[in-house]
């Protein structure tokens, strides 16, 4: 049996006449009768019996009618669902985000959900290099990462570039002369950086200091941002952090100084996906939303 025969059978049951069912289905009576006989032959039992002018279901026919309704309903639901997935109305958005992702991401996701309320989400947070691997392994389709990285395998949508800030506890005597500081002024401060050596922020800070021919006093690293801010607040150390981190973790008792433009300590943030890889409609819609947002 196939889905077409089940639909024929439903029409016969509900119209109770072959002629009426044939008219409803816009086919002639002989083929419809042949389909009914073929179903009975395949199942090895009578499905329909004549009772006066009308057709009546046998017990086997009643059982098949119940299943036929369920199968055809599931088929219709599948069609609707697949079409919705194809248009991005339904489906799943798989997204990797860097530890210091864009501060506006919650609002962007809120906008996306208001447009596509049936989409579900899988969001993973990690370092940018690991996120690149997750995209390569197709564990996530999209990832928001910090640049620079080797991105030959990816398509990249640049989102924005942000400045970095030097932060200390407010117990520390503030710089009196300015809200900006140079790398030369802070190279002796004990620093705990919010990134692992060799990755992201850690690399940018070392590269910037190397241009001043001064070596920063890095005493540690801490990827737990809440703990990092607690350490800074308690005067354990100072840090150099991107603007996004400060936007997402405000309210701490700290002094904040923008690192002067001459130091050129800036970080770029981008959205990546695999080159020559077909994105799901949900992912394509998210990319378009980010293009408009930035």
Image (tube, rainbow, N blue to C red):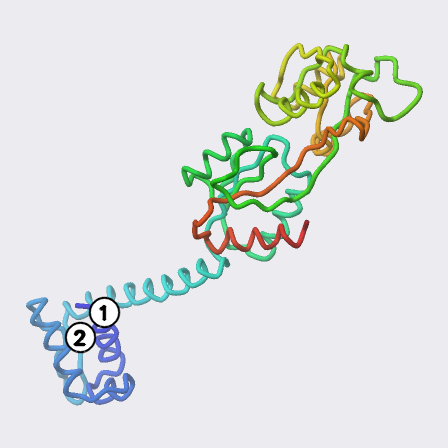
Q: Is residue 73 above or below residue 224?
A: below
Q: Which residue is mark 2?
A: 57
Instruction: Give the label on residue 65, or none.
Output: 1
Give the camera-side residue of 206 and 248: 206
User: Regarding mark 1 in the picture, which secondary structure is present there?
Assistant: helix
Residue that lies at the very extreme toward the right in this rendered image: 177
Percent x, y of residue 110: 63, 49
79 above or below 238? below
Distance Cα–Cα, label 2 vs label 1:
9 Å
At which x and y percent is residue 200? 60, 27
Do the CB atoms of the residues marked 2 and 1 lie less than 8 Å apart? Answer: yes
Query: Measuring 25% from the left and 67% from the top, which residue is drawn there?
Result: 68
Camera-side residue of 164 and 106: 164
**What is the crowding at mark 2: few (fewer than 14 residues within 10 Å), some, or many (at least 20)?**
some
Q: Say whether disc 2 or disc 1 marks the residue closer to the N-terminus.
A: 2
Q: Residues within 10 Å of mark 1 (few under 14, many from 20)?
A: many
Q: Residue at x 50, y 44 (%)?
A: 273
Q: Quadrant of residue 270?
A: top right
């Amino acid at each position: 049996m196939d889905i077409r025969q089940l639909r024929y059978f439903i029409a016969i049951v509900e119209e109770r006449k072959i002629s009426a069912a044939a008219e409803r289905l816009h086919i002639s009576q002989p083929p419809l009768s042949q389909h009914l006989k073929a179903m009975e032959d395949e199942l090895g039992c009578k499905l329909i019996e004549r009772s006066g002018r009308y057709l009546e279901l046998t017990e086997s026919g009643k059982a098949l009618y119940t299943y036929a309704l369920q199968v055809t309903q599931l088929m219709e639901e599948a069609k609707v669902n697949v079409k919705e997935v194809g248009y991005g109305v339904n489906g799943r958005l798989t997204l990797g985000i860097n530890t210091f992702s864009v501060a506006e991401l919650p609002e962007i996701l809120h906008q996306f959900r208001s447009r596509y309320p049936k989409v579900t989400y899988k969001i993973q947070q990690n370092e940018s290099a690991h996120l690149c691997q997750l995209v390569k392994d197709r564990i996530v389709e999209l990832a928001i990462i910090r640049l620079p990285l080797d991105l030959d395998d990816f398509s990249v949508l640049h989102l924005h570039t942000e400045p970095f800030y030097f932060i200390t506890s407010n117990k520390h005597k503030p710089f009196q002369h300015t809200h900006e500081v140079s790398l030369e002024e802070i190279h002796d401060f004990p620093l705990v950086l919010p990134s692992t050596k060799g990755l992201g922020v850690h690399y940018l800070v070392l590269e910037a200091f190397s241009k001043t021919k001064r070596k920063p006093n890095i005493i540690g690293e801490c990827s737990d941002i809440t703990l990092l801010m607690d350490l800074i607040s308690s005067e354990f150390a100072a840090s150099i952090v991107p603007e996004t981190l400060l936007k997402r973790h405000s309210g701490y008792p700290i002094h904040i100084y923008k690192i002067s433009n001459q130091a050129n300590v800036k970080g770029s943030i981008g959205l990546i996906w695999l080159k020559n890889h077909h994105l799901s409609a949900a992912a394509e819609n998210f990319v378009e939303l980010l293009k408009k947002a930035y």
